[in-house]
Every structure is written in structure tokens, then in C-alpha cells.
Amino acid sequence: MDLPIDEPSGRRRRGLLIVLSSPSGAGKSTISRMLLEADPAITMSISATTRPMRPGERDGVDYKFVDDAAFDAMVAAGEFVEWAPVFDFRYGTPKAPVKAALRDGRDILFDIDWQGTQQLHSAMGEDLVRIFLLPPSMAELERRLKARGTDSATVIASRMERAAGEISHWAEYDYVLVNGDSVACLEEVRAIVAAERLKRSRQAGLVTFVRDLVAGR
Ligand code: 5GP
């Protein structure tokens, strides 16, 4: 897929598909929000889910909240670029907004689990940059889940049980960060994004730029 973006220099580059995965509670929602605020070139992919809405969440902003029948229909219609069961619910990345964002030359951020990352990697390959966030400790992970105050004790216990399973997929990612402090972690994520944007393979107009440069044009 050729995905040109106009850079101030006049050079063009392919869009980035940035995946941020972590066990639930390792801080990826906070990091995602901070990254989107700090970098207007990045838009968030809004997933569809059968999970009930949490207090404070907004339909169409945090997720598109759908029932089982609607999710089934979206799967049948091939509307997802990837989908997976997570906990007791299903989550999927709608294809159309991703295509539109890429067509418009925007970078996209995905907050998806390891299953979705594998599927997205198969579909999008080299356009993907995979970042995994680890909590500093399991005790800190549990503390953060409880501090969120949105999930019941049973849900927290099941998230803790699954965290080790999610963490076991760390080696399938290009970058692995320990999120001890969200400001420091955001800086690391931004450094990755900056470097990935400069990769030679993403700078689509480089051949022309260098030819003109050398020719003195
Ligand atoms: P939560 O219910 O806490 O919002 O999300 C639970 C998990 O589902 C998180 O690990 C999140 O990354 C993952 N998730 C959210 N949206 C998607 C999606 O579209 N596809 C996949 N595969 N996982 C998702």
C-alpha cells in the first residue's frame, strides 16, 4: 500500500500504523491519550466491542458499542481488518475508518491485544510498528486496576489472571517499554514514532529528493 503524507520539507512518506498493546491496566489508555494530544498527525482507531460501556466512556469515541447480533453482522460483512475475543467479549478493528485515515495520509494508533496485532501484522505487514507496554511489577498492575474504580473485584481478579498470558506475547513486538512513569513512557513512544517516520523505506519521495539534491535543483 502506498500511503503518501506531505511533510513540511516537501518529501513524502508512508503512513504509520502504531500498535500499543499491554495487559489491561498497564497504562496504555493514558499513554494513547497523551500521544494523541501531543501529536495531531496521529488519529485513534475506534474499535467495535460487545463489552458494556464503562462509566465515563462514550459511544463512538472510546468504542463503538454493539450487541452480539450487530458484531456478527459486521464479521459476516467483512467489515473488520481484525477481530478477537478478549475476556468475555469480542473486539474488532473496523476496516473502513483505517482505510480512510490512510487515504487521507494520517498515522493511526491501535489499542488492541496480541491476537489483533498478529492479524494486523498479517494484513498490513511492514506498515505496522508494534509497541508493548509492561507494568513495573504485578503488584503495581493490580494497584492500577483497583485505582481505576470501574471494574468489580471479580473482573479485576480475572484481568490479573490473564495479564501473565498477555505478557507472554512480549517477544512478538518491535519495541517493549516498562511503563513506570507515564511522562517518561510517552517520551519513549514519541522517540519510536519519530525514528520510524524517518525510516528510509517509509520516505516514499526520497529517490526523487536525493536526485534533485545532487543535481542542485
Ligand atoms: P478494555 O475492555 O479494557 O477496553 O480492553 C480489553 C482489551 O481488548 C485490551 O487489551 C485492548 O487492547 C483489547 N482491544 C480493544 N480493542 C480491540 C480490537 O479492536 N481488537 C483486538 N484484537 N483487541 C482489542
Image (cartoon, rainbow, N blue to C red):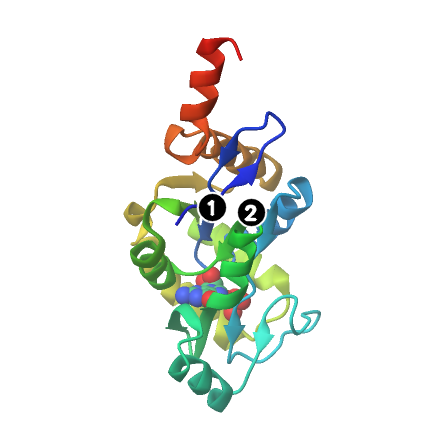
Q: Mark 1 points at which residue?
A: 3
Q: Is mark 2 on a helix, strand or loop?
A: loop
The reply, left or right, for residue 22 in relation to residue 59 is left
Task: Where is residue 213? Give x, y as percent.
Answer: 49, 13
The residue carrying mark 1 has its beta carbon less than 8 Å from ligand 1: no
Residue shown at 54%/64% (left/top)?
Answer: 97
Judging depth in this view, the residue of 126 and 32 nearest the camera is 126
Q: Name the residue under label 2.
A: 105
- Going from N to C along the chain, the mark reached first, 1 or 2, is 1
Judging depth in this view, the residue of 143 and 47 nearest the camera is 47
Within the image, what quadrant is residue 61 found in?
A: bottom right
Please identify the residue farthest to the bottom as the structure is shown: 69
* CA gap, disc 1 and disc 2: 6 Å
Task: Where is residue 159? Give x, y as percent.
Answer: 44, 67
Residue shown at 55%/59% (left/top)?
Answer: 100
Task: Where is residue 123? Give x, y as percent.
Answer: 33, 58
Residue shown at 55%/82% (left/top)?
Answer: 66
> Are the residues at dot 1 and dot 2 in contact (C-beta closer than 8 Å)?
yes
Task: Where is residue 175? Give x, y as percent.
Answer: 38, 39
Neighbourhood count class around disc 1 (C-alpha, 10 Å): few under 14, some 14–19, many 20 upward: some
Judging depth in this view, the residue of 202 and 162 nearest the camera is 202
Q: What element carries label 1?
A: loop
Count the marks: how many?
2
Residue 216 vs 135, above or below: the answer is above
| Amino acid type at mark 2 | Gly
